[in-house]
Image (spheres, grey):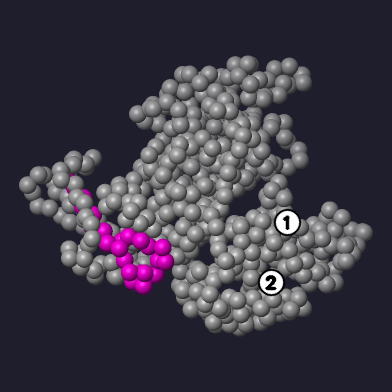
Amino acid sequence: MAVQTSAESAEPVPVVSEVVVRLARPEERLRWDTLMDTHHELGFKQFAGRGLRYVAEWRGKWLALVGWQTGVFQCRPRDRWLGWHKAVQFRRLHLCANNTRFLVLAEGQGLKNLASRVLGQNLRRLSADWQAHWGHALELAETFVDPRKYRGTSYLAANWIKLGLSKGYARSNGQYTAKHGQKKVMLVYELRRAARQRLADPQDQPEWRCGPVDVRYGAQDLRSLRAQLDAVEDGRGRHGKRHALGLVLALLVLARLAGKMGGRAAEAYSKTLKPDELRALGCRRGPATGEYEIPSDTTFQRVMERTDPASLERIIQQWTQPRLAQSQALAGDGKRIRGANRFTPPGQHWETVTLVEHATGMPVASRSYREEGGEQAALRALLEEVDLRGRVVTLDAGHAGKETERAIVEQHGGHILVRIKGNCPQTYQTLEELNWKLGCERSWSERRWQRTHRSSWERRSIEVFTPHPKLLPFAHARQAYRITHESCQSLGGAVKRSYSYGLSSLPASEATPQQLLDLQRGHWQVESANHYRRDKTFAEDSSRVRTGHGPANAAALNNLALALLLSQRPFETVPEAQIYYAGNRDEALQLLLDPA
């Protein structure tokens, strides 16, 4: 628990018995995140997967903030207390929620018994709220307290149970391998009577089933992009809002469709728009001149710096997903925005993780983050906002984790295909040591050599077998495969061979070896159709935007512009599309104003 340090609040003094704990509303998310990131000693970027935000208020005044997310993947004191072995722990982790953040604001500072009352009210409604939002109830609440700074009095007063000290490891690349030596006390609270006995019972309860997240978009989400952008949370101050945020963002997108990047370029492009076009976009008239006013380059810059990236990304996803084709395969991967890192301190650079359609390369959704090693957490948070039912998500080796696999298959009703490399040493060694020639059940190979862009020749083959459930640590692995890549500089020359391995939750009845190979090759759409285009066409890496939220918002707008360019006419290249829309501005405006 942290305390915001500021001057004491004025009268009247809040009354503890009148404090009410409620869920933060969607429009309050930016304020909640900003306060938590600013005043909590650990900061706040985003939840790792599923989470809930709570506000403790008195007569509309915020006194404290509480944040919950899915329980920690691995903790020896909790697992020993419950008697969990790995298989049981893996199946039941979603029944635990971790109190990852607790912040007492300045307005609640010094108010006696505030923390205990907030925790008590929060715990009484936590399981029901989780059931309403994520489709299943909770059995156990958990938290960690740093004994060097806090004694955990408010938790102990609320009847939490102290289990012991953690080992002092932090997560690094999805594993607890970074030792920081800061051992913390773990406490737990049974949300239901006899929760410990039920969680230790080998027999699963029917109500524990974690069903797929239902992400639906109705007719209200088929509004025009211009209308959708009005819902983005405005991070600017009270003064200086001459131009609506939705208008400024729409002009930035319109400029990108014509190949104009940056605030100055957007201002110059906006000045070429005709009065009827400015009126259609929602520009205001100047009171003195009666003419439509154009935002200045500093306005564009201020909007890029202060707009909450999570809010912008969420609105873009709400516009994009109802218009997607019924693509059965999505590729996910992260990208560091290098151009924004030159003047940023270590660990504060911006990165994005993006889901891309295999068939078209169209970006489906993206999420930005700043913390080192936060790519897996950002991906799991992104998965909560995308409809994955019946779809296959292909991932690179950096996302070959049990939590991600479980989230995609169990929580979202999808399938996963992931490459296995040295970052999963035991799994990789197991696959590498198999006798593929004798043990493979099915195989497929390309008969002809194909010319590559490097003027060499290559062909591939794949071997597949069904792994034993106890052979690999991935509970939903139904097929394991090895891809043999052969290449030569000229036909008849020396052939070089390399091997890659992977796992998929797709059973043999739903995916042939050739389809698995096509899915693995299609995964690189996220690199060629998204990352490369953002770097080369939209100059994302060479961008000098580096202050505030600018880099993350620039990446989100680049993805939105790519989605617009790829969703309409079948252009050969993205620059060709930009040239077309620069000369056919009426069609570019239609992309923003048409609700279809």
Q: Is residue 437 magenta?
A: no
Question: Image quadrant of residue 125?
Answer: bottom right
- Give the class, few, some or many, for how many residues have Cα within 10 Å of label 1's Cα (few <14, many ≥20): some
Question: Image quadrant of residue 6?
Answer: bottom right
Instruction: Identify the secondary structure beneath mark 1.
Output: strand
Identify the residue under disc 2: 191
Tell me where residue 213 appears, x and y as whole percent: 56, 53
Identify the residue under disc 1: 23
User: In the image, which residues are magenta?
Assistant: 457-480
Q: Nearer the viewer, residue 580 or 362?
A: 362
| x 36%, y 67%: residue | 424
The disc labelled 1 sits on which kind of residue? Leu
Please name which of the two marks, 2 or 1, marks the residue nearer to the observer: 2
| x 81%, y 58%: residue | 57
Query: Is disc 2 in contact with disc 1, using a CB cutoff of under 8 Å?
Result: no
Tell me where residue 82 appears, x and y as whole percent: 57, 80
Q: Nearer the viewer, residue 266 or 24?
A: 24
Real-space Cα distance between discs 2 and 1?
Answer: 18 Å
Q: Is residue 73 left or right of residue 64?
A: left
The disc labelled 2 sits on which kind of residue? Leu
Question: Image quadrant of residue 62?
Answer: bottom right
Q: Is residue 5 above or below residue 113?
A: above
Tell me where residue 408 appears, x and y as whole percent: 47, 56
Which quarter of the image is occupied by the C terminus?
top right
- Outermost residue, right direction? 12
Which quarter of the image is occupied by the N terminus?
bottom right
Q: Is residue 220 visible?
A: yes
- Give the class, few, some or many, for how many residues have Cα within 10 Å of label 2's Cα (few <14, many ≥20): some
Q: Is residue 461 magenta?
A: yes
Q: Earlier in the sequence, mark 2 or mark 1?
A: 1
| x 55%, y 23%: residue | 589
